[in-house]
Amino acid sequence: MAGRLTREITEMRITFLGTGAGSSTLRAHTGMALECPDGTKLLLDASSGNSVLRHANAVGLNLREFDDLLLSHDHPDHMAGIDFVQFDRALFGGNCDPLRVHASHEALEGLKRHCLATRLNIWDISGDYGRNLEGREFLHWKPSPSGHVIELGPRTTAWHFPADHITGASGWRVECDGMAVVFSGDTRYSPEVARASEGADLLIHEAFCVGDTVLASNAGHCTGGEAGQVAAEAGVASLVLTHLTDAFHADPDPLGVEAAQHYTGPITIAQDCQQITLG
Ligand SMILES: [Zn+2]
Ligand SMILES: [Zn+2]
């Protein structure tokens, strides 16, 4: 009898569960799922409402298998979906572990205030956990300082770095088996993001508009050209633009065209439910 064939997974897969900016009405707010070759499954931001759950279902991902969430900052278009991710686990997750939320201290404090305000299953935020009325733990607060390397799986590590957006805002760098993926989070143009992205296989960078760097900066964001500049400075192997406003939903090409004036590598504009594989 033939033995069971097993195929070693050597790829890192990124699923875009939401690619819209806070003002977007045509895309889900920003969130991603990362599946690493060592089996580690991570959420990178959580969109708002039930978007990450809906889009995960649409592409066949079960978010109850994702025990770690890397949060960029505590604006609701990135964080408010945590309500429903933990609520789904509470109702249908059996004995799954509390969802570990990794973030800067400031972003986690914002999340805790949000949980207390919405009171969806979480009523107690004291100590290291968010708990329901019976005291069961559903969220595990995991604050870390910038640059501190966190072990997330047998061969997966991550660390966050400051983004230029609001207090406590960060981007994240995730590495596994020699592959590196960086997410800028929301940010103005920042050399800090370029430093943290050095040599990455993929930089996922936000892009707010084209041409008007002052408009972008005043909104706490950057232009497609500035995202391309960061990708070029960092020498990344590929660039994905995300966190789009409605103005670029139907025709996002101007963002990519402007990025390409600075960065000569491959550029993709993310779409909801799109999957990208590295390795
Ligand atoms: Zn945002
Ligand atoms: Zn933001």
Image (spheres, helix red, strand yellow):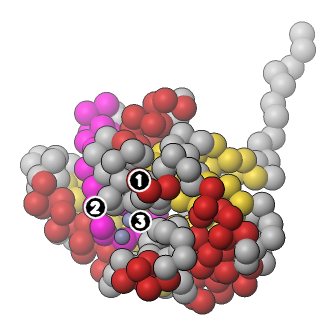
The residue shown at (86%, 20%) is 3
Image quadrant assignment for residue 182: bottom right
Q: Is residue 104 left or right of residue 211?
A: left
Report the span colored magenta.
Answer: 70-92
The residue carrying mark 3 is: 71
- Spot the residue most to the bottom: 191
User: Which one is in front, 125 or 235?
Assistant: 235
Locate residue 270, reporting x and y percent. Answer: 58, 51
Packing grade of label 1 (10 A; few <14, some 14-19, many >=20) is some
Is residue 82 magenta-colored?
yes
The residue carrying mark 2 is: 76
- Tell me if label 1 and label 2 are in contact, CB under 8 Å: no
Q: Is residue 7 left or right of residue 107?
A: right
The residue shown at (18%, 63%) is 114
Of labels 1 and 3, the one closer to you: 1
Quarter the N terminus occupies: top right
Predominant secondary structure, magenta span: helix
The residue shown at (75%, 52%) is 278
Q: Which amino acid lies under the numbered mark 2 shown in the image of this protein?
A: Pro
The answer for how far apart the CA atoms under marks 1 and 3 are is 24 Å
The residue shown at (90%, 14%) is 2
Packing grade of label 3 (10 A; few <14, some 14-19, many >=20) is many
Q: Which amino acid lies under the numbered mark 1 shown in the image of this protein?
A: Asp
